[in-house]
Image (tube, coloured by chain):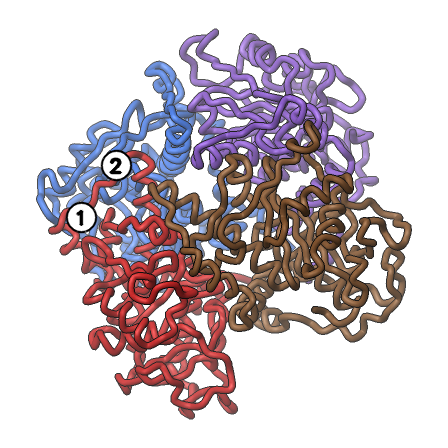
Chain colours: A brown, B purple, C blue, D red
Amino acid sequence: MPDNLSDARYEVALANRMLANEGVLDAFGHVSLRHPADPSRYLLSRSRSPGLIEPDDVLEFTLDSEPVVPPSVQLYAERVIHGCTYQARPDVTAVCHHHAPAVMPFCIAGVAIVPVFHLGAAGGETLPFWNQRDEFGDTNLLVVKPEEGRSLARALGSRAAVLMNNHGATVVGRDLRELVSRSIFMCQNADYQLGAQLLGKVATLSAGETKLAGTLNAMPNVTNRTWEYWTLRLAEAGRMPPRAAAKARPRAASARASGSRRTPAKRPAKRRK
Amino acid sequence: MPDNLSDARYEVALANRMLANEGVLDAFGHVSLRHPADPSRYLLSRSRSPGLIEPDDVLEFTLDSEPVVPPSVQLYAERVIHGCTYQARPDVTAVCHHHAPAVMPFCIAGVAIVPVFHLGAAGGETLPFWNQRDEFGDTNLLVVKPEEGRSLARALGSRAAVLMNNHGATVVGRDLRELVSRSIFMCQNADYQLGAQLLGKVATLSAGETKLAGTLNAMPNVTNRTWEYWTLRLAEAGRMPPRAAAKARPRAASARASGSRRTPAKRPAKRRK
Amino acid sequence: MPDNLSDARYEVALANRMLANEGVLDAFGHVSLRHPADPSRYLLSRSRSPGLIEPDDVLEFTLDSEPVVPPSVQLYAERVIHGCTYQARPDVTAVCHHHAPAVMPFCIAGVAIVPVFHLGAAGGETLPFWNQRDEFGDTNLLVVKPEEGRSLARALGSRAAVLMNNHGATVVGRDLRELVSRSIFMCQNADYQLGAQLLGKVATLSAGETKLAGTLNAMPNVTNRTWEYWTLRLAEAGRMPPRAAAKARPRAASARASGSRRTPAKRPAKRRK
Amino acid sequence: MPDNLSDARYEVALANRMLANEGVLDAFGHVSLRHPADPSRYLLSRSRSPGLIEPDDVLEFTLDSEPVVPPSVQLYAERVIHGCTYQARPDVTAVCHHHAPAVMPFCIAGVAIVPVFHLGAAGGETLPFWNQRDEFGDTNLLVVKPEEGRSLARALGSRAAVLMNNHGATVVGRDLRELVSRSIFMCQNADYQLGAQLLGKVATLSAGETKLAGTLNAMPNVTNRTWEYWTLRLAEAGRMPPRAAAKARPRAASARASGSRRTPAKRPAKRRK
């Protein structure tokens, strides 16, 4: 976990951009991080497409999803997805809500995503569903009320992700790296599962394999490799987050200097002239 | 709505390029805008692939789809799609005709596109079809006669879009932003619907959800975010429209200066060295 | 048709690169052009992936597919596809052989490609098949013998294209622009047809619509727009052919100067800083 | 085969990057090469995503998959896939393990990949399967134990590739070029086979055609063209491997100078300004 708030805000921007670059997020979706020093707060961007988020866009919220500093900018309507998940899940440090094209057919068909390859086993045997209509009747499908957020968190339970009917998915992780890995591999798993179904049969991992393979995404051998890979791809696309402005940070809730910012993935910059 | 003609012509070029960059338009298709000062005219490019349109290409037409100034350039054959729609729909300010790959299978199979996720609900419950053959027999499928344009507008009725059998779609909006959003999300909706059908079941939004979610694309929280996102992607691809030539504008119907042109999306230019 | 040999060789390189850039050709496939001054010869590159071909790579062949000048470079093994087609079809000026991903499923399933949208109607009602095995038994599927080339040309007959079982397709045109258009729209048609079949029904154009729409790809309104579009995309990708070397052209069969070469698509270069 | 170790290490990096650039490898997968001078050793990168591998990352291993020099870096967990294959197959000089999206549906459905076009015939009539669970019960599906590697090599037998249930594939070649060709064309074959099945029928090559076409990928006419093509695409993407550091190569097992390194694909660099 990033060790100070300035780093944390940079990492939130980075994770948002990384998932946008890998096709999990598009104009919509958002990644949040529990505050590194205060577990009763979380960090989330102002309302903005995830691929454009800068460290200065990242604000602090209470677990009731209220901004700590009165904002001068527009906020995401669906903040309660994050706040209610952090309230219900002390083990969770990072949350992603997305509408990835790979999972949408499953969210619409109501077909369960099941682990079909080793890296897709992070979600456990079968991902749960949450249908907003069951409890709240007709809505515009945005999750905006605290009771909607709490209902979603109950459907998530102790799992790694929950599918939202006709809407998308919410994924959790113990840290940003696990969250990013899970989100990406869950999409690959969904794509491969659909392909296998078109071929006529979906053979899943056994319960034992699912349990054993389910920890792969947290192995340093795996997370180091994937993090370097997705960072390089983001840098190659010219989409790395800018550093936070040092002097005036009107929207930021912290006054810490960001001079100690380390540069991730210097290498790709060197590779290009 | 853009507040002067020079802005409007730039916005027409921008919307055409944006939809080309997002894969809705390709070598074909066109976006028009009702004249900002004179509702009895509309703005449309000369015949050119939409991704290449420049403000200077955008001409004025009467609602009978006749050019206001005798043109020295080739015009789109299917102008009546625009003129007849503006005649029939006083509430409509922007029109897009396209052959997007996402909708073509539905246009060929005659299968209705139905709202399967919240952002896809803009079209209402089920999009209408128009089969040129029903009223006009064998044609080359281009919509070129005023009576063909009027027939298409009748099939559109008060809806957000109409599917054209074996041809494509025509989408309308109250402004360019709603039009662009609707066109893009309608394609996503079609893709997800096909994916869900491959999984075996297409669960649609309820009538109530469709009505409530149908206004999402017009919410500033949504349109600001998407417009910034698609503009950034266009700028990243190096495809922003050039400014109109200040001095000689032989093909333009207006003599207004364009010196006050504001630059959209400066930011991405700064991000790249 | 290009009016001199130097232009013609440039156009052959351009058409090969254009179809590679649009995904019709990959490491394989080739485009040839009948010699602009001598209908008993044709122009084809030395053996090279089509996206890399330069004007200097383009050689002259007799209609028996023998090089006019003894070559110092490797030649395509399947030249007879071109020579035998030019022999059988005096109306044909350009030939493309390809393995485009869009048509391969049809070549493997033996399912006919039928016109499902107006721009896909260039091939007529149903494209013919040619199965090399029927006449020649087990081969490696390359078309290398004159009798194989003649058999393929017979299957093509007077049509715009022929599908080759488990292999690919051969497309013809009255000029390079019609050839390129037909090749690209045939792939789009195949993609849309497969999509419609997945939705459950493939409604084709009527015979009358097919005939009327079949000429769209040759209309200047259409070909000018598409040629500008595909040229821009090629230029944006940085893949325009280089000019022929003026002095030493060891592999070229002609000694004409290429000083009068015109530059297509200057514009995109200007658009980029 | 590369004629010295320095060349060989560069070629290993190049083949890894090439297959990553063509979508066969992603964050995972690896290509190894038998040592050019010592058939009892092989060359494989330290643990790293294949698209990022540099010559300095490439280490020497015994056929028991032990590093020749004690490493200071992390190693791939699945090295035995390579070592056990080289032990069982003296004819094999290059090995690739991958999870390409094209083959995953077949690995999950347990549906055989069969030759459906001439370039896809390299694998022979039907590719064998290996299910780790059959012999080893529940695992995390990584192939890490020598007995797992030997079991996989037995399933491979004398074939060109083996599919691993719910995991991926392992492909072999007599040299890196054949390996790269086979890996790429096997993925194309899988894609086309799935497409044909969606159309309703998969017609395979006959046994005789498979045998005759199976050697195409080793024909110089083919391998020269494809190698130039994939190298160009890698260079266009700005992803060619850097040269090895001349002076200090702490992780390298060899001290040979790399001054004689030739630059592949100079041309694309010239084409871009």
Of residues C17 and A58, the one drawn nearer to the viewer in this rendering: A58
Label 1: which secondary element: loop
Percent coordinates x, y for residue C245 in the rendering: 40, 60
The quarter of the picture where residue B134 lies is top left
User: Between marks 1 and 2, how big is the CA–CA gap?
Assistant: 20 Å
- Judge from the rendering whether residue A165 lies leftward or rightward of residue D148; answer left or right: right
For the question of whether residue D115 can be seen, the reply is yes
The residue that label 1 is drawn on is: C141
**Which sits in the foreground, C255 or B108?**
B108
Tell me which corner region of the image, top left, top right, bottom left or bottom right, holds residue A179: bottom right
Q: Which amino acid does label 2 sit on?
A: Lys
Q: In this view, does C134 lie to the left or right of D156?
A: left
Q: Name the residue under label 2.
A: D201
- Residue D67: % across, % down: 40, 85
Quarter containing the N terminus of chain A: bottom right
Q: Position of residue A177 (x, y in %)?
A: 62, 64
**Chain ID of residue with mark 1:** C
Q: Looking at the image, which residue is at 33% across and 85% down?
A: D62
Q: Is residue A188 above or below residue C84?
A: below
A83 vs A255, left or right, is left
Which quadrant is the C terminus of chain A positioned in? Answer: bottom right
Identify which residue, A76 or B242, lies in the foreground: A76
Give the label on residue D187, or none: none
**In this orientation, which residue lies closer to the viewer: B104 or C255?**
B104
The amino acid pointed to by label 1 is: Leu
Would you call the spot at circle 1 few (<14 residues within 10 Å), some (14-19), or many (20 or more)?
many
Residue B10 drawn at (x, y percent): 72, 35
Residue shown at 30% from the left, 55% from the top: D186
